[in-house]
Image: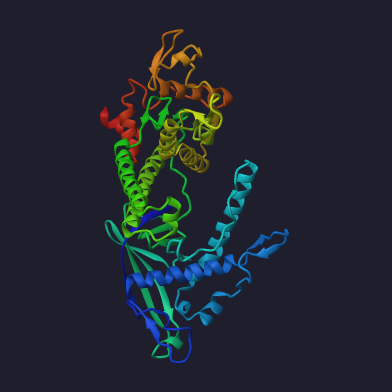
Amino acid sequence: MSQRVRVTRVSVKGASPFIGLSDNGDSGSERLYSRDPDELMRWLCGAWRTRFNMHRSRRNRYDKDGNLVPIGGEPDLRTPKQSRLTQSWTAAVPTAVLESPDRLERQDWFAAVKRRETLKQQGKDPGRMPRFRSRKHSPDIFACWYNNGRNARFQRVGRRSGIVFITGQNPGQYTASGKRESFVIRIHVRLSEPVCAYTSVRVNWDRRELVFVNDPQAITRQPTHKAVGIDRGVAVAVATSDGAMLRLPKNDLKRADRLVRMHQRAQARAIKASGKTTKDYYRGQMSKRFRAHARAISRLSAKASRTVADRQQKWSTGLVRDYDAIFIEDLNIAGMTSKTRPVPNPLRPGQYLPNGQARKRGLNRVMRQASLSRLETLIRYKADRAGVLVAQVPAPYTSQRCNACGHIAKDNRESQAVFSCINCGHTANADTNAARNILDAGASAHPEITHGTQQGRTCPGDGGTSDDWNRAIGEGRSPDETRTSAA
């Protein structure tokens, strides 16, 4: 769990931090001090990246002969103290910053190794081995341990503002008085909610973001003796067996997608005007305008992703709080977003017939945007800490089966939103019908769980509607509060 906040400005209190010598430490070198916010943050990020790469140089890889060799040639075994003595520009870096890459590099390495093993087992390309963090391609980031309040202390100074204090000292050999001089780098942040207890802070200076890293906390809840089935989709992000329809803000996402396409067309025109191929253009010197379009695309894509993640965080919290059992259909997301198979033209060898790939490309894009897998991941990790059962049920025929009589037919699905059984005439929303089938299948597999599809929070006549439930979760409130106020 983490809390991301925006960095508004950086200031320094006390002595000016020592950031290194003007050259490699030869005689006549000049001591450099700075109070410039950007220079100080780049200094901390560079020191952190250097220590990270020192630890990474001690990792091994297999060479062509199958022997383990260090990935960086000769491993760098210097301790933080030795680094301060041999690299003057790290002499005043706080210890809590220089020690943090040790643990974070291990986490990064073993997570990457485990991910590669999983991809190998699935028959996929595992990708390349983890490498060093480069100055050019890696973002400027650093981490600082909280260490029980010894550093990276946070103080709230306003209703929506606070300061993170990172303390350090200039060594005596680099000060005019010959004694240590203390300094405090104050990172001013803008808050959207109270800061929970945290173990460290991580700063991304490129994005002007600071993250409080804290342990996930269990959701406060009371047993409800209710179960729910949820159907995930694109038109409706989440449909519950109780009739709730949770939708993403499509207008905002469409606007972001439209702007992204506008910038992409501008990039295409720039490449065409250069007379080069796309690969040669990217390898060569790109224009400033082209880079500006790339940055705009990155910002818009990140904003759209955060919008979807925010909704899913709130939906998953509401589901875990309100139900003792959650049943989800087992979807093959990778297969659903794969390319369509090519159709060879039997009359013209070497050519292919239309296979609907252009239409499928658009569907794949919106499915990736909906992040169906991430929603299940959020529900699972929150449910594990809250003691809520989460189980998968087989997905086949959940959208074609009538929840009233059990008749299965493709013609039961009149459209994306309408379900009308050709056997008994039962009519319902197609997504709600599928969610109820998922609930029934999950309840059959887990008979010890008592489900209440007719006692759900959004059941017609229960004092609340699906729009009320959606609005309550979106605002972080319990659906009970909405129903009580409506009554």
Is 437 drawn above or below residue 141 in the view shown? above
- Quadrant location, the C terminus: top left
In this rendering, the count of numbered labels is: 0
Front one among 404 and 319 = 404
384 left or right of 174 in image: right
Residue sitting nearer the eye, 228 or 134: 134
Between 131 and 307, the one lying in front of the other is 131
Q: How is the image coloured?
A: rainbow
Residue at screen point 35% across, 48% down: 268
Q: Residue at x 36, y 72 (%)?
A: 39
Residue 90 is at least partly visible in this image: yes
Residue 172 placed where, x, y %?
44, 87
Locate residue 402, reporting x and y percent: 47, 15
Pick whichever, 161 or 283, lies toward us.
283
Q: Residue at x 43, y 88 (%)?
A: 29
- Residue in the picture at 61% in, 45% down: 118
Image: 481 above or below 400? below
Point out the residue furthest to the front here.
348
**Residue 150 can be seen, yes or no:** no
Residue 276: % across, % down: 40, 53
Q: Is 218 rendered above or below residue 150?
A: above
Whole-percent x and y of residue 361?
A: 44, 35
